[in-house]
Amino acid sequence: MKKTLFVALLACFTMMFASCNKEKELTGTSWKTHTDTTQQMTMEGITATMHMVIDGTMKFSDATNGSLTLTTSGEMSAMGMSFPIEEETETQAFTYTFDGEAGTITVSDDEETLTMPFTYNKKENTINFSISETDEETGATIAFDMVFTEVK
């Protein structure tokens, strides 16, 4: 009887620790972000302030494919004037890799391929992107973080 009880407890401990170390699977999951960022930049000697709001949904349809829908809007201010940034919604298919802690999302169109690295925060159950883009014409850089939270 003691031997059977010991084996049963050992099996329970083994299952408990095995389930704690399980890696996150993204297949079939959906994630949302609401990012509100304000940045200052200088273009051709003029300092401008850009306020952007980004709402997004990221869906992982299988082990290598997904889609990202982003709705952006905002306002640009410079020299005492403000200009709205029209709301725009865009959906883009992507391929991805993920090792349980980090990965990349790759988006391709007819003109270019863009690969963006991301990290997975297991404790907070979030996917985190650090975005940094430099406009080729003006040289202005926009940098911000986007945090996606899983939709249950």
Image (cartoon, helix red, strand yellow):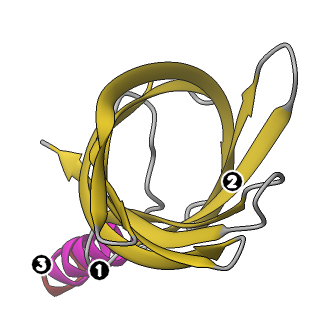
Residue type (three-letter) at the residue carrying disc 3: Met
Where 149 sits versus 141, above or below?
A: above
First reached walking from the N terminus: tag 3 or tag 1: 3
- The percent coordinates of residue 117 (x first, y second) are 68, 60
The quarter of the image holding the C terminus is: top left
Crowding around mark 3 (Cα neighbors within 10 Å: few <14, some 14 to 19, many 20+) is few
> In the figure, 28 relative to 73: above or below?
above
Which comes before the other along the chain, label 3 or label 2? 3
Q: Main secondary structure of the magenta part?
A: helix
Using the numbered discs, state the Cα–Cα distance from disc 2 to disc 1 in whole angstroms.
Answer: 22 Å
Q: What element carries label 1?
A: loop
Front position among marks 3 and 2: 2
Residue 123: give its label. 1
Q: In which quarter of the image is residue 44?
A: bottom right
Residues rendered magenta in the picture: 5-20
Closest to the camera, between mark 3 and mark 1, is: 1
Q: Which of marks 2 and 1 is nearer the N terminus?
A: 2
Tag on residue 40? none
Residue type beneath disc 2: Met
Measuring from the top left, give residue 1's x and y in whole percent. 12, 78
Query: Which residue does the numbered mark 2 point to in the structure image?
Result: 116
